[in-house]
Image (cartoon, grey):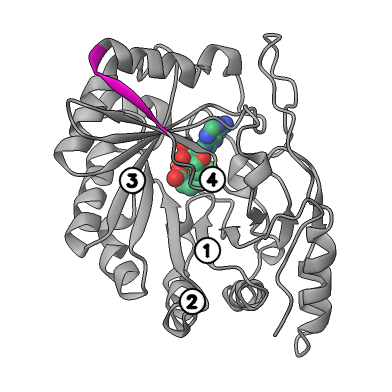
Amino acid sequence: MTAPLIDPFARAITYLRVSVTDRCDFRCVYCMSENMTFLPKRELLTLEELDRMCSTFIGLGVEKLRITGGEPLVRRGIMTFFDGMKRHLDAGTLKELTLTTNGSQLEKYASALYDAGVRRVNVSLDTLDEGKFADVTRWGRLPQVLRGIDAAQAAGLRVKINAVALKGFNEPELPQITEWCASRDIDLTWIEVMPMGDIGNEDRIDQYWSLKDVRAKYAEHYTVTDLAENTGGPARYVRLKETGQKIGFITPLSHNFCESCNRVRLTCTGEIYLCLGQEDRADLRAPLRAHPNDNAPLEEAIRAAINLKPKGHDFDYSRQTASGQMPRHMSHTGG
Ligand code: SAM
Ligand code: SF4
């Protein structure tokens, strides 16, 4: 039996988020600049390498895989990868295979994802207004995403909406978004904007709408009860009495979840990042490529990397500057 991955702070690493591409068919204003330069193809892990990498992590005790990007569903041939991961679900070693998507390709892939064993999908959607959707995503079209969500639900996938809280933007829409989700039995989580990567002319402080204020906004419209449950992840939850909904809040800028952090991230180039808000990382592509028939060097490199996992991160907006700013884009490490 292989020893599980335990970091220097005694946290068991059981959750891997994998960015399968840095490319995307949208250009969300908080995530990318309009003119992005993407990586040359040879830098990316091939689908076979992604399979081998993920399978190795699963062999070391990772039980949950979340596939992300960029937009994971624009990676050519990505269903081959999902189909391949099904064998680990069938074997019981992988407990959950899921993804975060902008929804643009869900209409096409929802059934195939279900067949590959995916049961839940996070769809990022910040507004239900067609004009505002086009503004915030630059290249996205709302009806396409809504059709994708319909297809996901029809295929039997449980949908969760992740909405980035943007001051003055989706703030007035909070009741509509909430009730739309309630009427469709969709879970809803709000995410605070994080200082990731160069996004052109947008000002992060201008975009920042603290989740404390989002919660206060809920209290203007609903009876809000804080829930004690802690799922081990960065979300905190409240219950709305009027709709019965549980609403999540992801506050990456607070440190409330670092001590229970069980996750690491793999970039599309095969680097492992130990914390979303720190630069600690290691290259896993070199040991993978150098030893095509021997997994031991890769396993050793993974263990060495886990030993670098920091205690927590340093984001801080409190001085009205985005300190702890990360040079890399979210689409590189995967959100
Ligand atoms: N393209 C997919 C999508 O949009 O769901 C997956 C990748 S995207 C980088 C993952 C999540 O990160 C999305 O929910 C997106 O809204 C969020 N995100 C991107 N940039 C962010 C930022 N600067 N702060 C907070 N969340 C961000
Ligand atoms: Fe693309 Fe997702 Fe980033 Fe939007 S948030 S630009 S959909 S990767």
Give coordinates of residue 6: x percent, y percent: 74, 62
User: Dot 1 corresponds to which residue?
Assistant: 65
Cα separation, mark 3 vs mark 1, equals 16 Å
**Disc assigned to residue 233:** 4
Mark 4 residue CB less than 8 A from any atom of ligand 1: no
Q: Please tell me whether residue 312 belongs to the stretch shown in magenta.
A: no
| Residue type, label 4 | Gly
Cα separation, mark 1 vs mark 4, equals 14 Å
Rate crowding at label 3 as few (under 14), some (14 to 19) or many (20 or more) other CA atoms within 10 Å: many
User: Dot 2 corresponds to which residue?
Assistant: 85
User: Dot 3 corresponds to which residue?
Assistant: 160
In primary-sequence order, the first of circles 1 and 4 is 1
Query: Callout 1: helix, strand or loop?
Result: strand
Q: Are marks 1 and 2 in contact (CB under 8 Å)?
A: yes
| Residue type, label 2 | Met
Q: Please tell me whether residue 224 belongs to the stretch shown in magenta.
A: yes
For the point 49% across and 80% down, which residue is it? Answer: 88
Rendered position, 269 above or below 277: below
Q: Quadrant of residue 137?
A: top left
Q: Nearer the viewer, mark 1 or mark 4?
A: 4
| Residue type, label 1 | Leu
In primary-sequence order, the first of circles 3 and 1 is 1
